[in-house]
Amino acid sequence: MSKGNYLNLLGLAYRARKCSLGEETIVKDIQKKRAKVVLIANDIGPQTHKKLTDKCKSYNVPFFIVDDRETLSNAIGKMDRVAVAILDAGFANKMKSLLM
């Protein structure tokens, strides 16, 4: 897996406003079926990890455990982001192909 590629794509998706950030927003986007794929930092807290992965599973939203929060945050130019939901099908399909 070429890590740089998915991070570049994440940055593009974020700049195109095709992402949602923040645990509550992501959960809402999963429930409303807006989230197409969710990226979760590998150093996320256990409760948040369970909450997000359980939501993804119950709504059949694919998710990937990716790099740490610092790497994820740097890709979108924000501080301390532990998860990002991709809301655009095109970006989500490309993301899945890079991460699988």
Image (tube, grey):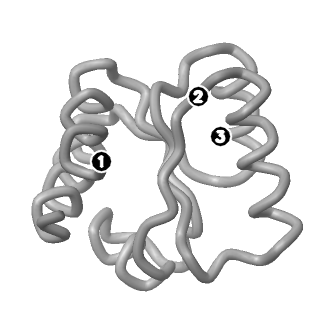
Q: Which residue is mark 3?
A: 26
Residue at 55% x, 50% y is: 21
Of the residues tagged 1 and 3, which is closer to the observer? Answer: 1
Against 30, residue 40 (above or below) is: below
- Estimate how packed mark 3 is, as few (under 14), some (14 to 19) or many (20 or more) residues with alpha carbons within 10 Å: many
Q: Position of residue 50 (x, y in %)?
A: 82, 57
Seen from the viewer's position, the closer of residues 13 and 43 is 43
Residue 56 is drawn in which quadrant?
top right
Q: Are marks 2 and 1 in contact (CB under 8 Å)?
A: no
Seen from the viewer's position, the closer of residues 33 and 80 is 33
Q: Position of residue 59 (x, y in %)?
A: 72, 21
Q: Position of residue 1 (x, y in %)?
A: 18, 64
Against 94, residue 82 (above or below) is: below
Separation of residues labelled 2 and 1 (CA atoms): 15 Å
Left/right placement of residue 7 relative to residue 87 reads left
Q: Which residue is mark 1?
A: 100
Q: Which residue is mark 2?
A: 61
